[in-house]
Amino acid sequence: MPVKCPLCFQKLDATQQLTRVCLSHPDLKQTFPFDIDRKDIFCKVKTCENPRSIQTGVFLRHVGCPAKNPYWKGDGTPIAVPEKDTLEREGKVFHIQHWLFGALRELAGFEPDASEMWFPLHMFRTVNWYSLDERQGQGIGATIRLAGAKNAGKTVLATMALVPYGYAQPQPVPAFRVENYTYVSPEGIGVVQQPQEQFLQALLPFSMLRDQQNTPEWVAGTPPTRANIKAAFFRANVEDRKWAEEVWKYVLNSKEPWHSLLFYDTAGEDNEKPAEKHKDPVDIGAVVLDGSQLRFLGHVTPPNAKTASERLATIAANRKCLIVTKVDLIQDDLLLPAERELLAKLRAGEAVEPDAEKKLLLRWLGDKNALPAERDLAYQLADVEVFLVWTEGLNDTDPGSLPRTFGLRRFVTWSLDGRFAPKKKKGK
Ligand SMILES: Nc1nc2c(ncn2[C@@H]2O[C@H](COP(=O)(O)OP(=O)(O)OP(=O)(O)O)[C@@H](O)[C@H]2O)c(=O)[nH]1
Ligand SMILES: [Mg+2]
Ligand SMILES: [Zn+2]
Ligand SMILES: [Zn+2]
């Protein structure tokens, strides 16, 4: 497997160059031809291998990358990044703050003419863990592509995975750290469509949640792009071992302090076409199904199951899973008592039988009036893990009320260590 740029997916070999800037030691910055032995991607100061924060560690850029810095104008003027920015949508003005403004400003100070977007070193190592021969069993993370019909809930899921609130149910905000990075690349090589606006829209939820506010406008349809990236960097808080031991053994037991999940979000309209658009392989292919739009419920959006079934068959990934969203919208009285009980357990964060979520979905997909696509989807689930993950309160705008996500911990824990688990053998 060739080493790739995480933003443009171009293969990197000795003809391609990277620039490294450590924000803690910027005077050691270096541009070097890529080499598989990894030595130049790290800061020359040994302690920087384990940065206290991703935000003050090493950043890389791929020289000549078509994924540009959203503040690059292309007219020869040096890059100027504001301290914060504003986004106008439907007549409303949103003030956006994010650590990336500060980091990009500093990086522009050292490299004012670099047109390419910067990304954290940890992201590069996660995308290329296999090729870079990162220590097995102490892996540093995984790449995940989200695929599903329009409105299935892909962007909400990826966003909530990047913020502490995403893991707050049923406990209060967990005692582990999660940092985030986001970037929207152009659709193809060439003209960038409104790069700043897309970038700001991607930052909006993080800015808003940081201020403990919820505005439904933070959710916007994802435009077709080559790469819409949301990266979560986790660090177990060793002082609070209880929570870490409970769910996060993997993070705690590993020598790597940081673990990342790199989500590649996609546009529903691209997924709804039968042919696979995104062919770059990832570790985990996560197909997203809107659980509230199924035939057994009476109201159904046909692309929902059809798209999920097609994408499950074509997604280029080492492991596949199916995520059922919007479970909160299912009318209680349509469920069997055992199903209501299962949902209550998931809501309370209690352990459930292995495959309980899959069994529940299979019942829904096996309804006597099920659509052919729903049956197709059921046939494909034998080797596929099923997760129910949903977010409530997305439209609550009362001061202090924030979206609440259920079921995310299980999916994220599986994603972080699932890659190393032996694949389940199916009985003949
Ligand atoms: N009730 C409820 N609403 C949800 C949930 N997840 C997403 N939504 C809502 O569903 C709509 C679509 O969510 P998105 O995350 O933007 O969907 P998407 O799959 O990214 O859609 P595209 O980008 O158009 O492909 C938004 O109005 C969300 O607020 C959920 O779990 N429960
Ligand atoms: Mg989306
Ligand atoms: Zn350094
Ligand atoms: Zn690149």
Image: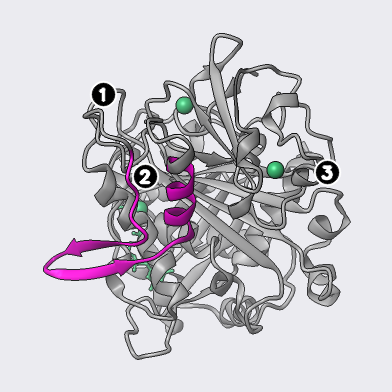
Disc on res. 190 = 1
Query: Does the Cβ of the disc 3 residue fall within 8 Å of ligand 3?
Result: no
Q: Residue furthest top?
A: 15
Q: Amino acid at mark 2?
A: Lys
Query: Which residue occupies 80% across, 48% down?
Result: 256
Please say if 65 is above or below 164: above
Of marks 3 and 1, which one's residue comes earlier in the chain? Answer: 3
84 part of magenta stretch: yes
Q: Quadrant of residue 311?
A: top left
Question: Nearest the camera: 95 or 215?
Answer: 95
Question: Nearest the camera: 338 or 109?
Answer: 109
Instruction: State the extent of the magenta-drawn residues as a range.
Output: 79-108
Tags 2 and 3 touching, CB below 8 Å: no
Q: Residue furthest front?
A: 27
| Residue at the spot of label 3 | 138
Query: Which residue occupies 82% across, 71% down?
Result: 246
Please say if 114 is above or below 352: above
| Residue at the spot of label 2 | 306
Please tell me whether mark 3 or mark 1 is closer to you in this view.
Answer: 1
Work out which quarter of the rendered image holds the C terminus and state it. top right
Q: How many marks?
A: 3
Please say if 108 is above or below 222: above
Q: Residue furthest left?
A: 91
Q: Amino acid at mark 3?
A: Gln
Image position, residue 396 (x, y; %): 34, 84
Query: Which residue occupies 29% across, 69% down?
Result: 95
